[in-house]
Structure formats: C-alpha cells, structure tokens
C-alpha cells in the first residue's frame, strides 16, 4: 500500500450533506430499517457524526467526522485485500495517517476484515489516502464506484432508487432534497408517495435533515 493524494472526493461539508439527504430519502422509501442501505447519525458519539452504506452484497463504506476532520473507509468486495494487510499497515510507522482515520479503522462497530479504501482530510486540506495492492498491482479506482453517492449526489441516488427500490423519483424533488431544502409533507410525498412524514420525524432528527 502507498500514500497518495485523492482529487475526486468532494469537501466534507458536501459529503455530509449528501449523506443526510440519502439517509432521509432511504427512510422515506423504506420505513422498514432492515431494507435501507444509507444511514446517517449526526450524534453518533460525543463530538462525532457518522454515515454509512451497506449495499446488501458485502460491500460497504463508513464516514466518520470529528470537528472539521473526516475519514472514509470502504470495502468494494472485488477489491478487498487480505485481512493481514490492515494489520501490517497499523504496525507500520512509516505510513502516517490522521487521528480521525485511525479512529474509523479501530472503532469496534466499524471493524471489518476487508479494506480496499481509506481516505482522510481536515479543513482546507486535500484528501489523502492509501492505494492498496490487489493481485500485485496498485488499485486504480480505489473504491470509487462504491462512493458514487458522495461524489454525484442526487444523480447517483436517482439510479439507486430505480435499481434497488424499483421506483422513479421526481428529479426536481430529489434535487431539492439533496440541496437540503427543509422537508415538508409535500416534498416527502414527491420522494415517496406513501411516505408518512410524522412517523419519520424522530429518525430525521437523528439523521440531522432539516424539517420545514
């Protein structure tokens, strides 16, 4: 594995806003929590916010924010490295990472053996990360396909809704949601016609999505 600079990730503010919107949309489309892929908790632990996705096929990402610092780890299943690669990395003092990246690596709730992507940043700093060797070669996409939501926002969720929820969402309503427009009953039903905003309010508060 090698250190590198990553130029395709948005700012932490954009990533967290898109994470909130995706979690809110998934909540409206899937009242049953077990069927949601996107989650967000702005008070996950004192001083920390977290967002994550499990795609149902073994791949995942986790985002952890501590103040102005953010770290992302993910496993795109086909790119996962051997479990001992992470152990070797953790013991290697020549590969420095930020405190928030160490936290997302070592947090018990986020500990999975496979890891194909790790990136971190702080306020006004570029994203840094690791390139893992897969089958003897450096991974080129570094898990980018799994992170399409944080990169593309509403466009990526539109595709996700069609493929996973088997619904077509009004693009204008979805764009409004991803622009952090306060959610009211009209917008909620434009996203999911059967949505019951009142019953979703407690979880929207956890997500941190504004309500009108």
Image (cartoon, rainbow, N blue to C red):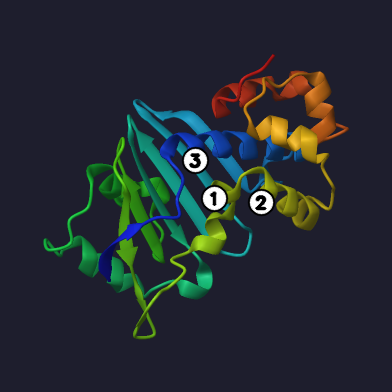
The residue under label 3 is 15
Q: Name which residue lies at 31% across and 63% down.
A: 130
Tell me whether the residue at label 2 lies in contact with that at label 3, contact meaning CB atoms closer than 8 angstroms: no
Q: Position of residue 121 (x, y in %)?
A: 31, 44
The residue under label 2 is 156
The residue under label 1 is 151
| Quadrant of residue 89 within the rendered picture | bottom left
Tell me whether the residue at label 2 lies in contact with that at label 1, contact meaning CB atoms closer than 8 angstroms: yes
Q: Name which residue lies at 80% across and 20% down.
A: 185
The residue lying toward the viewer, choosing from 16 and 78, is: 16
- At mark 2, the secondary structure is helix
**Relative to 188, residue 105 above or below:** below
Which numbered disc flags the more N-terminal residue, 3 or 1? 3
Q: Is residue 192 visible?
A: yes
Extreme top residue here? 212
- At mark 1, the secondary structure is helix
In the figure, is residue 154 to the left or right of 104?
right
């Amino acid at each position: 594995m090698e250190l590198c600079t990553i130029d395709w990730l948005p700012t932490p503010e954009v990533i967290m806003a898109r994470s909130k919107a995706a979690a809110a949309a998934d909540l409206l489309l899937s009242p049953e929590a077990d069927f949601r892929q996107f989650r967000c908790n702005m008070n996950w632990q004192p001083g920390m916010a977290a967002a994550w996705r499990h795609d149902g096929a073994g791949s995942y990402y986790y985002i952890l924010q501590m103040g102005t610092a953010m770290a992302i780890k993910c496993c795109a299943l086909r790119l996962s490295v051997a479990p001992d690669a992470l152990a070797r990395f953790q013991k290697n003092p020549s590969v420095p990472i930020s405190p928030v990246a160490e936290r997302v690596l070592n947090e018990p709730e986020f500990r999975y053996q496979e890891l194909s992507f790790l990136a971190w940043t702080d306020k006004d700093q570029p994203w840094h990360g690791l390139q893992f060797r897969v089958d003897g070669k450096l991974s080129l996409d570094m898990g980018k396909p799994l992170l399409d939501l944080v990169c593309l926002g509403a466009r990526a969720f539109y595709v996700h809704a069609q493929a996973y929820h088997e619904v077509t969402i009004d693009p204008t309503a979805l764009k409004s949601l991803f622009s952090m427009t306060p959610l009211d009953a009209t917008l909620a039903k434009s996203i999911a016609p059967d949505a019951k905003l009142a019953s979703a309010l407690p979880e929207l508060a956890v997500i941190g999505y504004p309500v009108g």
